[in-house]
Amino acid sequence: MCRKAQGTMMKIGIENLNIYGCSMALDQGKLAEARGKDPQKVVKDFLIDTRSLNPLWEDVVTMGANAAKPIVENIDPKSIGILIVGTESSVDFGKPISTNITGALGLPPNIRNYETKHACYSGIAAMDAAVNWLASGFGDGRKALVISSDFSREHLRTKEEFVLGGTAAAVLLSDTPRLLEFEPRRKGTWTTDIYDTFRPSARAEVGNNEVSLYAYMDALEGAWGDYVSRAEGGTDFDGDHRWLCYHTPFPGIAFQAHRTLCNINAPRRKSEVIEDFERRVVPTLQFSRRLGSTYGSSNFVGIAALLSGDSKLGTGDRIGFYAYGSGAIGEFWSARLCDGARAEMKKMDIQSSLNARMNASVEEYEKIELHRSQVVELPDFNPDRSFPGGLWESAYRGRELLTLEKVENYVRTYAWS
Amino acid sequence: MTRFEVIEVMKRIIADNLDDMNVDNIDPQKSMKDYGANSLDMIEVVSCSMRELNIKVPRAELAEIQDIDGLADKFMEYIDT
């Protein structure tokens, strides 16, 4: 809770949430087979069943707008005072995609908006700024819209090819939360200056896997230590956190993250860690297993998965979150479940939208990714709606999804399908 | 703690974490990858070793190290002798 100027306590949290998992999915097992790998081992190691895939007429602008549309169309747009978009995949180095999205969604001209960047931490950075804006009271009771939108770059036939994907999350924050209520005074941060995974150009997404994994764990330990030292009233890893949601560049890392925190707090056997992992962590991974890398949306995807699943939830359950951004920063934060959160979340029916995605073949995936890499920096580009065959007609035409219509002299034009 | 003792601790933890591994068959001049360890296995071995040796080494300093001997050398830098 946050303290109002008058001395009373105000709630701040998530009022509504949606996840957009693209319109296509690539089967990880089939990709493994095509690359001569053992499909079962690849799926088991990374805990990814399918990864999200975009056609050429989608980018992080369309993904973000498509995630936000079902939220925005059910409220008065004037009730939103600020839009912050977190991304490491922006389509422009100067113009923030928050402006494209504001235009596409028809948000009022007096809305503050900007982009945040910190690799996969960008979504939580955006949320953090929005929480502070709400707590300040300067928004005069208006709500904050936070969007996180990211998509992988082309990595055909590299070892990184099994940890790719993309997702957008739209999060409506306000002083009338229905899903989660934040605990702003329970947050721990740790940062270091390192090159683990980074995007030095519009096409490159490079780094060192081992450096990144090690940095992730260093930041986890550092952020948890800071959380413990700052948490109001102290904290108990096992007793206080009914659910734990770790950042997932690939969901398989969540087990190692959980094992690390378990052993810091009270060393235990691997079998005990596995049992606890299945009880407190696995319910947050059900969507990321279908999305692949969720980048800046990771923690939001975890919330949506937990609330969309069938685990027994209790009002006030505390969820511990670990957010990580290469570069690097780690943040451990927590929030509590609101009464009726599951019923509210299920209205969004994210499960059905993931089920409706078209299954792309490995050949289609390769052709799309190669083509995207070739056109991403061109000043002029018209996406070919005839490939993959039938996708436009079945998943877009008349469905009111935002799509990239053309790029002309670097100016991007978007249109609702 | 001597370098020999550090290597003995690491060998025991490697054997505990990898399937079908016997302590006596671990050669410190090899990489854990030679014994089938994936990146997450290596993270666990490093975490357990640091905990048992009561040292805290920034893991990011370990990424370029090629073999178990190299890891032992790095750990020795952080052990009060």
Image (tube, grey):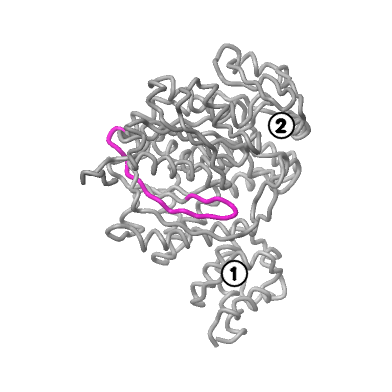
Residue at (73% x, 22% y) in the render: A408
Do tag 1 and tag 2 residues touch (Cβ < 8 Å)? no
Q: State whether residue A227 is above or below residue A347.
A: below
Out of B43 and B11, give the one closest to the viewer: B43
Of residues A280 and A206, the one drawn nearer to the viewer in this rendering = A206
Residue type, mark 1 in image: Ile
Point 39% across, 66% down: residue: A266
- Farthest-out residue, top: A398
Q: Which secondary structure dominates the residues rendered in magenta?
A: strand
Q: Which residue carries the number 2 mark? A: A365
Q: Horizontal placement of B31 versus A309: left or right?
A: right
Q: Residue at x 61, y 79 (%)?
A: B7
Q: Position of residue A412 (x, y in %)?
A: 67, 24
Query: Element type at marker 2?
Result: helix
Q: Mark 2 lies on which chain?
A: A
Quarter-wise, where is residue A204 in the image? Answer: top right
Residue for point 60% across, 13% down = A397
- Where, quadrant-wise, is the N terminus of chain A in this rendering? top left
User: Which residue matches tag 1?
Assistant: B14
**In the rendering, at what x and y percent does residue A295 appear?**
56, 42
Q: Quick check: can you spot residue A98?
A: yes
- Where's residue A416, x and y in %? 58, 16
Residue A337 is a magenta residue: yes
- Residue range in magenta is A323-341
Q: What residue type is labelled 2?
A: Tyr
